[in-house]
Amino acid sequence: MYREKIKVLDCTIRDGGLINNHDFDRRFVREVYKAISAAGVDYIELGYKNSKKLFSTEEYGLWKFCDDDEISKIVEGIESRTKISIMVDVGRVELDDVKPKSESPVDMIRVASYVKDIDKAIHMVNNFTDKGYEVTINIMAISRDQGPELEESLHQIEEETKVKVVYIVDSFGALYQETTEHLVKMFKRILKSKEVGFHGHNHMQLAFGNTIEAIIHDANYLDGTVYGIGRAAGNCPLELLIGFLKNPKFNIRPIFDLISREFIPLREKIEWGYIIPYAISGMMNEHPRAAIALRKSDKKEDYKEFYESLVSTDLD
Amino acid sequence: MYREKIKVLDCTIRDGGLINNHDFDRRFVREVYKAISAAGVDYIELGYKNSKKLFSTEEYGLWKFCDDDEISKIVEGIESRTKISIMVDVGRVELDDVKPKSESPVDMIRVASYVKDIDKAIHMVNNFTDKGYEVTINIMAISRDQGPELEESLHQIEEETKVKVVYIVDSFGALYQETTEHLVKMFKRILKSKEVGFHGHNHMQLAFGNTIEAIIHDANYLDGTVYGIGRAAGNCPLELLIGFLKNPKFNIRPIFDLISREFIPLREKIEWGYIIPYAISGMMNEHPRAAIALRKSDKKEDYKEFYESLVSTDLD
């Protein structure tokens, strides 16, 4: 009893890259691509396409830029039916850097946008649609943007674009099941010609639970990452999502094997997961940047003081 | 906007004790009791009452037995409105060891029972009710016991006991939101004179999400543990539950402070949380005992082989 329309996207390298400046080496990325392919996951997202005029290649790794020839090196010689996705942020990419689909190993481009930037996002997605890509819009930080502007932007997307999917992105890890249900139902109501996607963050250990909630209310595009890697508390663990879905095309074994071999050692070097300052950020519906800074300071375990710093803002 | 009937029970020392043979020292237990009291949590559960004929006081710590005088030493001199709970397993306690409530610091006794042992549990709870305690029945391993015997046992509890609360206990961490909803609705339908409680396990990171689901469908007694401590993957983190509930009687600060001071160092010594073999146990609806054994072996990170060992059982 599975829903055939459901598609899973692994964004391990892309969201995980937010922890290490997108500096995964090619061997590691190939190992991930190999396992994700063997697991039968529908899409893999390898990073961002950013303008090299805005970000330095000295400071950031390969997956901040996702050059087509670097992607080709990753996929070469590995048997796979998994499609390749990249993400672009509104205002950070040169449209001319994106070649027509026929000349690129990329299948899908996901445009990340706040509600306030939706006009710019629409301009971008129409450019990428014309170039032949599958295109999505991912609405970021949605827990802060649930007013009438959100509904208006969804109407615009429905009427002015040919995007395939519109994602709810819980950037702050602040959604609960009831807010997730509310948002998925709103998206389904307005976006009659689109699929709805869900990208959870795990600040309050609800990324997987909220993803299940989104599935129940008919979201068909679902993000996960291996062992939940991702900025701050990380994302919905891909292995839990695959374990939950009943579609026989998925094979969970390569993911367990990959975690044993690559992610247990990696977790010793970089940090993500259930960590109290991230939980506090989620509860307060705040961007995790203050918590990320705390974790790099010598007050990293001083949770009470961190909590006070967030609640002590004057009520004005 | 809060539901006044909701009661939170902290079972940090009781469920956490399953990791270390109930051997927390008195200083640590007093620190936990102090913080839970300051946080305004309704109940604290300190351990099990077991027969010393069945278990050795050499092998197990104080909180396997919960002698009244040991509990009195913990609470002495600490200002608190938090009630004291202990747990008993069917068949492991001498009823004569339980004094009348008027002679004991204990307020509530929770009787843990499988569905098959419900007649024995009823015999016990009626004894404890007559002695003046608040009494609950906690139905263990419920993900394995959802057949007609479960409904029958609920009817028996409704008709033959004066227990206050009947808990759904997801011992194997195998419930999803939909199964949680189904169970809470069934309990509410049959147990017309009782409250429904929920005790989650976090094998698939769903303890908190399932607890929210139980709240939505009108469960009013909710278990949590500090930093999610508990056997295998642990329980619903108390700090997340308190962060979610809007009742002004709760104060989350003492819990954050306690985690900083006591639980971060403790986690270096004993293990709980999101660990793949526990996630696999949850997915397979299995007791975590094989996974716990694996984590003590030199194959502790060999997830694929562990998964194969669980799925390779013949289909007969």
Image (cartoon, coloured by chain):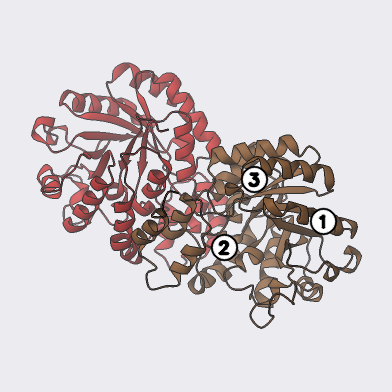
Chain colours: A brown, B red
* Left or right: where B303 falls relative to B127: right
Asked if labels 1 and 3 touch by Cβ distance under 8 angstroms, the answer is no
Q: Are marks 2 and 3 on the same chain?
A: yes
Badge 1: residue crowd in 10 Å (few <14, some 14–19, many ≥20) = few
Q: Which residue is mark 3?
A: A245
Q: Quadrant of the C terminus of chain B?
A: top right
Relative to A72, residue A121 above or below:
above
> Disc 3 on helix, strand or loop?
loop
Q: Which residue is mark 2?
A: A229
Find the distance from the CA under tag 3 to the CA under tag 1.
Answer: 35 Å
Work out whether residue A272 or residue B37 is closer to the camera in this orientation and state it.
B37
The reply to whether residue B316 is visible in this rendering is: no
Q: Give percent across and percent down for residue B211.
A: 44, 39
Q: Quadrant of the N terminus of chain B?
A: top left
Q: Earlier in the sequence, mark 2 or mark 1?
A: 1
Q: Which residue is mark 1?
A: A123
